[in-house]
Amino acid sequence: MNAGQEAVEDRVLMIVPTLGRRIDLLRRTLESLHTGQGVGVDAVLVTPKAGLAMRELASHFGAKVTETPGHISAAVNHGLTVAGPQHRFAGWIGDDDLLRPGALARAVAVLRRDTTASAAFGACDYIDVAGATMFTRRPPPLAPWLMHLVPGVVKQEATLFRLTALREIGGLDESLRFAMDLDLMLRLQSVGPMRRVEATLGAFCWHPGSITIVNREASLVEAQAIQRRHAPTWLRPVFPLLQWSIGVLLRRMAARINARWLPDAAEDARG
């Protein structure tokens, strides 16, 4: 394989589902996809309706725009249909989230080294709306297995997927609205292992308008229903107790984050 062929084969498709309501944050997201990534990246914005500002921004970054109705799961699946023969890897990111410089090159290197791997994941920063880092979530040992118990131990913003693996399992479950990434990653492990990247790959924006934050309780309920479907047989007798305990801990953690970083949101939650 010559250098030109290698570059073409290693292109990454990054899907950005967006409503186009936060053009300033979308600009920041698109900048992160092209800042020092070290691999070829093609971005596609998936939206119910693209306005002029979004199309101009996409043109500036060389991104494709495609329209489709539906929520995030449907948008990501639609974005995957844009993939061409030059795309071996794919991921998606929220329109207020970021990739860290060099993230894709590191993830691609891991996926090229282990051709059985279905995905590569790393640590994820939590940032505020201004982009300042609040803290970093580092996946614990055995993180892919621990997803059966604890949602969010592997962050989708810090994960890159092998495109053939995504296609083999049929992409995202479009009946899911909040925890579709958890379901996807649990199913992917039947195709191939998920491999750790020893670096911070992405940044998740924690702010009051985030879909994840606004729907935090619904997201947890959906995630735990997914985990029950995928629970190992030997664990099922104690699974309700485990889920109750973990749910209490996760709610407390979210409340502490809000109290420290988003005091207005914490006050609203108490009200």
Image (cartoon, rainbow, N blue to C red):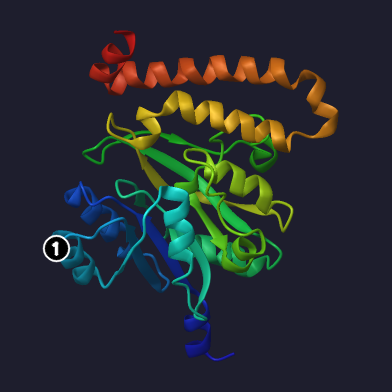
Image coordinates of residue 154 in percent, x first then y, are 55, 41
Query: Front-most of 112 and 166?
Result: 166
Query: Where 108 sits versus 222, above or below?
Result: below
> What's the residue at 45%, 57% (across, down)?
76
**Secondary structure beneath label 1:** helix
The residue tagged 1 is 52
Query: Front-most of 202 and 190?
Result: 190
Question: In the displayed image of the protein, which residue is found farthest to the front?
Answer: 69
Image coordinates of residue 9 in percent, x first then y, are 52, 80
Quadrant of the rendered structure where residue 113 is?
A: bottom right
Question: In the displayed image of the protein, which residue is found farthest to the right?
Answer: 234
- Residue 200 visible somewhere in the drawing: no
> What's the residue at 56%, 66% (across, down)?
109
> What's the residue at 57%, 57% (across, down)?
171
Image side of residue 2 versus residue 232, left or right: left
Query: Front-most of 82 and 257?
Result: 82
Quadrant of the rendered structure where residue 66 is?
A: bottom left
Image coordinates of residue 140 in percent, x first then y, are 61, 36
Quadrant of the rendered structure where residue 263 is?
A: top left
Kind of residue sitting beneath label 1: Leu
Image side of residue 78 versus residue 113, left or right: left
> What's the residue at 31%, 52% (across, down)?
18
